[in-house]
Image: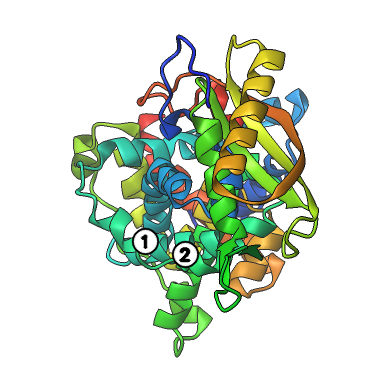
């Protein structure tokens, strides 16, 4: 029977993504659960950033992992689990936005953002993260999505254009305006 | 920022597009360009700062989240289709000719994983049964990938894994196992729960 050495049997939590992904692809639910717990919170945060609120992010995370379970056997590089999950998450989040906005033209999608906050409100935001979050809230939805997919998700212009179903030139323009707006909003703490 | 005229705004956007293209290609603007006008350097610094902030923002978002109960995990696990991984059907002999017993390939892989995991400091990864498992008695080779704990002696560990898997399959199945091949594909460390970026992660 199995030989047990001096080292205690390690819980599956210690296993690398590549091992867990391979096991899950073979049908090991326990391994998949470790992956869900390990990456779920980050996928939720990413979905929330793309969606602009957390109201649908749990649903997006659930759809993401259900799709991941189904597609795991085809995953070429099991070590690239996080990047792969992020791609599925962004796709699911965008699907949701698309469904939500089906009847709205692009013009409205890129509607002018609310007025920027007063310097006083801005000073209250203590951390860099809060400041960036507030600055992002002043972008139009289209600008925020492009910025999030580019800067957080690391997608190329072409990929973003495909995901959002707009020409790459539109993505380039939206990104430039997003970045310009962020610069203006965050000017004060340079 | 002071109010800018529409014209200045356009110029600014052009500058940002130019710089964005450079940064997105992983390039840096020349010193000449940065020194030419203060706006150039200001814009470049801001854009690179946003990028580095963006890299950390999701981790910061996660840390800022209050602890949640486990219902979200349960919601995912109950919604996935486990049957999809059953694999081939492996016949099991029985004294009665009327009985039709079988075992799924997925169940055998599960056996192999538990046998392997019982060997200290190892995890079984991918596991494949090569051969015609659907015909009783035909030769079958087991190929498994494994991760071993950092510092373990690999040849000994691989031998222990082979023994454990062979014994388990002999006990629980009628498969005619001709070889058990173990490939060590990963080395893992004990994971600190707060350190998601430990070397083991990228394996």
Q: Is residue A9 left or right of residue B156?
A: left
Kindly identify the residue that appears in the image at 57 percent across and 62 percent down.
B103
SS of the residue under disc 2? helix
SS of the residue under disc 1? helix
Q: Which residue is mark 1?
A: B76
> The residue marked by circle 1 belongs to what chain?
B
Instruction: Tell me where residue A96 appears, x and y as whole percent.
Output: 43, 74
**Relative to B60, is A165 above or below?**
below
Whole-number angstrom distance, CA of label 2 to CA of label 1 = 7 Å
Instruction: Tell me where residue B73 appears, x and y as whole percent.
Output: 32, 54
Kindly identify the residue that appears in the image at 42 percent across and 73 percent down.
A111
As drawn, the label of residue B119 is: none
> The residue marked by circle 2 belongs to what chain?
A
| Residue B100, visible in the rendered structure | yes
Q: Which residue is mark 2?
A: A66
Kindly identify the residue that appears in the image at 48 percent across and 40 percent down.
B54
């Amino acid at each position: 029977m199995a030989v047990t050495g001096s080292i205690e049997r390690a819980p599956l939590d210690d296993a690398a993504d590549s091992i867990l992904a391979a096991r899950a692809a073979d049908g090991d639910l326990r391994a998949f659960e470790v992956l869900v717990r390990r990456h779920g919170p980050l996928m939720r945060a990413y979905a929330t950033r793309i969606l602009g609120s957390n109201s649908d992010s749990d649903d997006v995370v659930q759809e993401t992992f259900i799709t991941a379970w189904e597609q795991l056997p085809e995953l070429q590089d099991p070590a690239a689990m996080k990047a792969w999950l992020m791609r599925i998450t962004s796709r699911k989040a965008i699907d949701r936005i698309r469904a939500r906005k089906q009847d709205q033209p692009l013009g409205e999608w890129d509607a002018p953002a609310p007025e920027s906050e007063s310097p006083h409100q801005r000073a209250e935001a203590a951390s860099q993260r809060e400041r960036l979050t507030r600055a992002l809230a002043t972008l139009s939805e289209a600008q925020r999505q492009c910025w999030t997919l580019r800067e957080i998700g690391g997608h190329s212009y072409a990929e973003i254009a495909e995901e959002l179903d707009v020409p790459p030139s539109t993505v380039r323009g939206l990104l430039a305006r997003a970045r310009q707006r962020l610069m203006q909003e965050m000017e004060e703490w340079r | 920022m002071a109010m800018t005229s529409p014209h200045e705004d356009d110029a600014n956007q052009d500058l940002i597009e130019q710089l964005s293209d450079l940064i997105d290609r992983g390039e840096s603007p020349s010193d000449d360009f940065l020194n030419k006008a203060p706006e150039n350097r200001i814009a470049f610094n801001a854009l690179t700062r946003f990028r580095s902030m963006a890299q950390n923002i999701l981790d910061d978002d996660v840390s800022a989240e209050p602890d949640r109960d486990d219902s979200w995990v349960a919601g995912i696990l109950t919604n996935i289709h486990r049957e999809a991984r059953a694999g081939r059907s492996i016949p099991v002999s029985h004294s009665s000719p009327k009985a039709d017993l079988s075992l799924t390939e997925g169940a055998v892989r599960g056996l192999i994983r538990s046998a392997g995991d019982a060997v200290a400091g190892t995890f079984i990864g991918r596991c494949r049964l090569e051969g015609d498992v659907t015909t009783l008695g035909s030769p079958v080779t087991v190929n498994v990938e494994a991760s071993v704990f950092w510092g373990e002696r690999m040849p000994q560990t691989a031998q222990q894994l082979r023994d454990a898997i062979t014994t388990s399959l002999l006990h629980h199945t009628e498969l005619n196992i001709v070889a058990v091949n173990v490939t060590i594909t990963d080395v893992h460390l004990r994971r600190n729960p707060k350190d998601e970026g430990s070397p083991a992660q990228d394996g």
